[in-house]
Amino acid sequence: MTSEQIIRRSDILNTQVITRDNGKRLGIVSQVWVDIDQREVVALGLRDSLISISGLPRYMYLSSINQFGDVILVDNEDVIEDVEVEAFSNLMNWEVITETGEVLGRVRGFKFEAETGKLTSIIIASLGVPQIPDQFLSTYEISIEEVVSTGPSRLIVFEGAEERVNQLTVGVLERLGIGKAPWERGAEEEYYSAPRAVAPSNQLPSGVPLQPPKPKVRTPEPVAIEEEWNEDYIEEERPRREVMKARSYESIQYEEDEEDNWGNEAADKDRYKEPPAKPYKPYSNDYDDYDDVEGDAWEDTPPQPVNIPKKVKERQPEYEEESGY
């Protein structure tokens, strides 16, 4: 295998992989995985046959291949390894735009070196579906050196890269003079493109008002009438505010109960009578022997005799001794 051998992605798809030691068929190539940061092909995906859908996917690195041809030759079955393809991409249907935002197309294939796996160019078209034959679509080839940076499902190329593309095939529409390259479409096609269908829930109602507008009638402003001066004019007296005078209310008079036909006996019982007054007792001065308050407390005066009653001793009864104890 020489380093000058350039392989197109569509050429190795559905190619059988066979071992050299015993000629065992390992499967056919179903996918080509690319490390877009390094811009090189890293691994190949295998499946059992063209019609097989189920089954565990198998992978092998590009460095394990010995020779490309009608079949792909490898040393033995040990080339099947576990490859984390989540970090890689197949570049299919990626959008290609310039630095100014002009759309050039979508990726439908690429070319790479067989020995190193380095990408040499990418193939673009108006549709990025590789299942559509090249005879129906116009395809173009752009060098990988034109790629400035990458984004999520997007390749950004230098401004003016559309002038350096190489056309590979001419599509049916271009042969009929109807189709053109995406960057060659004039502004007229953009303006006369088919309008998008809008959902009924998002459609605006008609501009006809529900009710006819009412004409605005301008009412004239009232003109102030100036009164003429009259010498006999007498100013009317303003009504004075009457002050309410305080009124004295009469006391409430209750009706007297009618007398009983039998006399005043029942009425006298119900009436309140004052209790009879008790005779007044004369005040006896029992406390005439009080001490002299006005006299000198420190004067040497003979003490008054104290009347202490003498205690008479009572004769205690004598107890007779009882015999028999």
Image: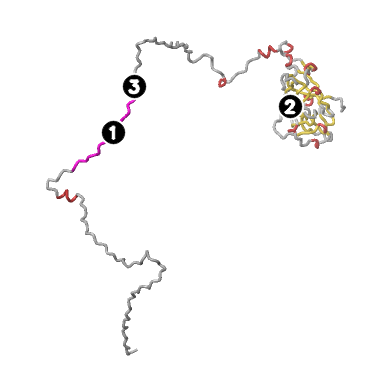
Counting from the top left corner in percent of width and height, residue 298 is at 42, 68
Occupied quadrant, residue 147: top right
* Residue 257 covered by magenta stretch: no
Q: What residue would you read off at disc 1?
A: 247
Mark 3 vs mark 2: in front: 3
Please, which colouring scheme is shown? secondary structure
Q: Secondary structure at mark 1?
A: loop
Question: Hey, what amino acid is under mark 1?
Answer: Arg
Depth check: 124 or 62 in front?
124
State the CA–CA distance, disc 1 to disc 3: 24 Å
* Quarter of the figure with the C terminus: bottom left
Q: Where is 316 relative to 64, above or below?
A: below
Q: Residues within 10 Å of mark 3 (few under 14, many from 20)?
A: few
Q: Mark 1 or mark 3, which has the lower sequence index?
A: 3
Counting from the top left corner in percent of width and height, residue 160 is at 78, 17
Depth check: 268 or 35 in front?
268
Q: Mark 3 or mark 2, which has the lower sequence index?
A: 2
Q: Is residue 191 left or right of residue 37?
A: left
Magenta region: which residues?
238-256
Question: Hey, what amino acid is under mark 2?
Answer: Gly
Q: What residue would you read off at disc 3?
A: 239
Q: Residue at x 85, y 25 (%)?
A: 5
Q: Mark 2 or mark 1, which has the lower sequence index?
A: 2
Examine the residues drawn in magenta and state their main secondary structure: loop
Question: Hey, what amino acid is under mark 3?
Answer: Pro
Q: Which mark is residue 151?
A: 2
Mark 2 vs mark 1: in front: 1
